[in-house]
Amino acid sequence: MYTINSTSNKTSSIISEVITDLKSLSQNNNFSKQQLASISEKIEKLISVLDNTTISDSHEFQKLFNAKNKIIELSNSLVENLERGDDLEASNTKAILAVWIDNFLLHNELIQFKFNEIVQKDSLDNHSYKDHNNSDLIHQQDDNLDFSDSIQGTISKAAAESFKQKLPSYLAQLPLGICIATGEDLVFQFANEKYLEIIDKDISIIGKKVSDTLIDIDSQLIFNAIKNVYDTGEVYIANEVLVKLERYGQFKNAYFDLVCEPLRELDNSISGVVVICTEVTEIASSRRALEESELKFRQIIDRSPVAKTILRGPEFKVELANKRMLDFFWRRTLEEVQGRPFLELFPELESQVFPQRLLQVYSTGIAHSENNALAYVDSSDGRKEYIFDYEYAPLLDENKKVDGILISAYDVTDRVRSEQALKVSEDRFKSIASVMQQFIWTATPKGQLDYFNEAIYEFSGKTEEDLLTNGWLSIVHPDDRDENIKLWLQSINTGKDFIFEHRFRKSNGDYRWQLSRAVAQRDDQGTILQWVGTSTDIHDQIKFQETLEDLVDARTKDLSILNIELQSSNQDLESFAYISSHDLQEPLRKIQTFINIILDSDYENLSDRGKSYFLRVESAAARMKNLITDLLTYSRTSAVDKDFEKVNLQELLEEIEGDFIETLEDKNGNITVESMPIVSGVSFQLSQLFVNLISNSIKFARDGVPPQIKISSKILSGSEINIPNLYTNQKYVEITLQDNGIGFSQEYASKIFEVFQRLHAKGTYDGTGIGLAICKKIVDKHHGLIAASSVPGEGATFTILLPLEL
């Protein structure tokens, strides 16, 4: 039985006052420092009143006591947040504090509910207790006299029953989700409207298992936590728990602060679990979005090639520094500097201008930047000097007050040192240039000429003021100025070298040709620092070139006349070819005709000597006919020009092979032709090429050895062949014709392609000595190459290179 000391009116007054304030704070979520102090004081007072009663031994009171401690702890933390101005942390603390206030209110309601149950039971059994005169009960009544008096004086059975009936209504009005599940299977016994709204269910879940009802939860972690509370009696508290719930037909992520406590009976046994949940999705999502935004901001700073750091508060404590700042300027680790005052880390800066600049930005909120600032920074590796461009930018809180400074620093030490070195070099350069006879001048990166050496002043008769004020174009010939300006602007815009031939006016009014060149001078980053130019007198060369051009024109006219004469000579050769093909062949045909008549009718009447002479005449006439035919072929090979077409070498060789069937059968030989490509060429000339080569191989076959001729090909690029006369970006076909004939000595490999060249006596092998020369000429006309290789007695190989396309 629970007993409350003190007067009922006093206890009720305190409870009512505290509960009213707590409900107001929980619903409005509006916590001021004064309200927090007041509510903490009242809660402590309420607990002290209840602590002097037998109710303090109950589990509900212990939970109420724990909730009180948590509320006071969070209240103190919130006061610190508000004093520090940390709005983000204050917002999070407020949300958690609201949950614990609701938890406190819930346990107070449960205490009142159980208290009234006992009051009702005591009222019903009071008469029975007196009749039996139970000594224990009497003793208990003696110990709890104040309680009995209070109960009998203030609470009736009807009031207790009314409170019991109203408890579900009280729980339903609380701004947090509450459900009670009982039994080992955790069956829903109660769920308020807020809880049903959270899980998007209706009152029909009462009497159903939690595990069956919440099948839409993405994981079973929460159910497992509830089951563990029932099994062990340990309270489960978690903040911002991510749960995937099915709401309005869609699965959505939500965040909750959860408190799961065991529901105990009077005998301290666990009969179920009370689940209290408050949705904090908006707060959690906002905080996570802010954290992500801050993380991205920090990543941007950390990855920046510019050194950056963030200093917070009037002490300028280091909050963040990127790798460039840490490694290059400070030469320290983040652990060494984070959270420490900036000037405590770098006391050497006290004697420099930077502390004053920081205070100026912090107090005024106006950014400050400076170029080519000099600083000395100490570290474990000693003191180093830096020249850098920097900016101090104020960081504002949500109230537009400065609470930090973002420092950006860009090292320009090398650039400044380069500029200083360039200045020294420039002074030395001007000193040397002043005594040179060649014209030397410089210009700014934008193309404005700012220096001329003495030679220009002497040549033009202009003063330094004239050229710098009126411009250098004043000495350029009027006809050259437009082009001069155009090319100069192109160089300024592109950074490419300026090269131009133009005329400068001398002090006596004469113009002389100059070759002007200008080159951009750059720093290590490629930025143009200035232009350096020279102008060289080329007047005499120009005049010599003009004279030379006159001579070339005259020589060109002479060559034109010679070309006309050459064309006339070519026409004469063509006429000769015509005569060779008609006029010379006609009497030869008559000679051969008469020889045949004499051989047919009077050959037997001739003496042996006459027969010998006559046969020699017949042989000479035949050779004469072959010679005229070969000469005519050779001439026609030169005449054909640009009559190229697609020629299928496979088909062409098959036709040629048919022409040699009888000859090969007589000698028991054969021709093997592998796959051949299509090339650009003159069909009848390529046919003549292969006919001559095949005839040559048959003619020079070894005695008693059947001629074997193999023709193959492969495609190569000009770069693979690596021969100077061939184009590297052209595709070629390499054709190889190989025989097993008598061969020849390799020293004659090039001689055999010359006209009338023979390696054997006339009587040994037939021929005019023109066949291979015709082959070479055909290949030349097709922009290819032909070569031969051989070993005497082992046959010969002819290699032909022809472009696939022309």
Image (spheres, rainbow, N blue to C red):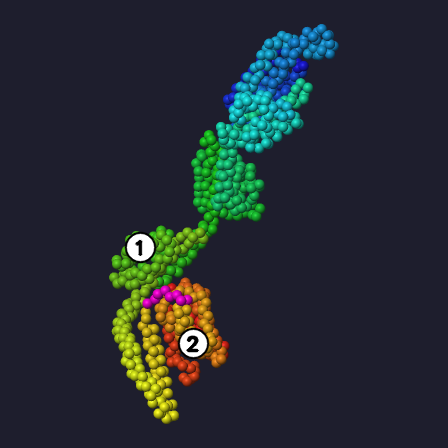
Indicate the quadrant containing the C terminus: top left, top right, bottom left or bottom right.
bottom left
Of 504 and 716, nearer the camera is 716
* Residue situated furthest right in the rendering: 135
Q: Which image quarter is the N terminus in? A: top right
Q: Which quarter of the figure has residue 116?
A: top right
Residue 451 x, y percent position in the rendering: 35, 55
Q: Is residue 642 left or right of residue 800?
A: left
Which segment did they paint magenta? 643-651
**Pointer 1 local density, CA inside 10 Å: few below 14, some 14–19, many at least 20:** few
**Which residue occupies 42% across, 56% down?**
425
Q: Residue at x 34, y 63 (%)?
A: 536
The residue positioned 46% from the left and 48% from the top of the image is: 412
* Residue linked to disc 1: 486
Disc ID at residue 68: none
> Image point 32% across, 74% down: which residue?
636
Mark pair 2, 1: CA separation: 76 Å
Question: What amino acid is at disc 2?
Answer: Thr
Residue 384 vs residue 623, the one in the foreground: 623
Where does residue 779 sit, x and y in percent of width and height?
38, 71
Residue 71 belongs to magenta span: no
Can residue 31 be seen by looking at this rendering? no
